[in-house]
Image (spheres, rainbow, N blue to C red):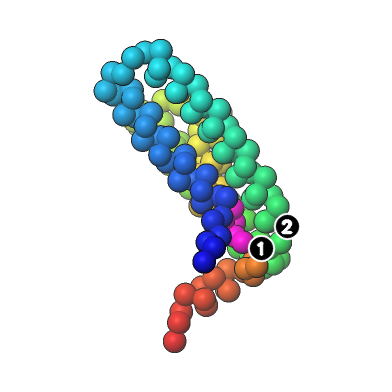
Amino acid sequence: MKKNIHLGKLLTIIFLIQTGMVFFAVYTGIDKWVTNKFIGTYIISIILYIIYIVIMTIINIRKLERRDLKKRVFTFVKSFILFSLLNYICNYFKISNSGLLNAISIAFGGAFGIAFWDVVFLKKKEKYSLDYVYKKDNIK
């Protein structure tokens, strides 16, 4: 029996394993030359992983139903405003002192992840609808 492994899930697993290996290498004090080379390849893989996520999200967003796209955009805007306000509140009370670009990028990334993360992992044969996903899990 041939198993169909989705590229997005495989890349996510590889990314998580590499992250664990980087933490292990940095905190155990392995030779500096080896650690630097590994961190360099890790940074390159992070950049490629982000490019893959953006491309797959753009490709799969076009296949979404209009109603689901509106829901996701509303969730994105709502999350972006919430994260921006939380950052503003933290800066007001001096919990963190981040610049405007840093605050906007964190809010944008968090909101994008909340609203569109599952779009990356949609398969071609699945229907691109939130209703389909929720109904599929409700087995009677």
Residue farthest to the front, as pictured: 1
The residue depicted at 55 percent of the width and 27 percent of the height is 44
What mark, if any, has residue 62 been given in the picture?
Answer: 2
Q: Check the image and name the residue furthest to the bottom.
A: 140
Q: Is residue 34 magenta?
A: no
**Do the residues bearing badges 1 and 2 touch, measured as CB atoms within 8 Å?**
no
Residue 124 image label: 1
Circle 1: residue type: Lys
Q: Is residue 12 above or below residue 94?
A: below
* Residue displayed at 54% across by 63% down: 2
The picture quadrant where one finds residue 66 is: bottom right
What kind of element bears circle 1? loop
Type of amino acid at the residue the image marks with label 2:
Arg
> Can see residue 115?
no
SS at circle 2: loop
Image position of 17 with respect to 129: above or below: above
Whether residue 12 is visible to the viewer of this picture, yes or no, is yes
The image shows residue 103 at horizontal and vertical percentages of 50, 33
Find residue 23 and report its image quarter: top left
The residue located at (40%, 39%) in the rendering is 17
Q: Residues within 10 Å of mark 1 (few under 14, many from 20)?
A: few
- Which sits earlier in the primary sequence, circle 1 or circle 2? 2
Residue 61 is left or right of residue 36, and the answer is right
* Residue 85 location (% of width, % of height): 47, 42
Using a 10 Å C-alpha cutoff, classify the residue at mark 2 as few (fewer than 14 neighbours), some (14 to 19) or many (20 or more). Answer: few
| Cα separation between marks 1 and 2 | 12 Å
Residue at 62% in and 42% down: 52
Q: Nearer the viewer, residue 94 or 80?
A: 80
Which stretch is magenta? 119-124
**90 or 62, which lies in front?**
62
Instruction: Check the picture and name the quadrant holding the C terminus.
Output: bottom left
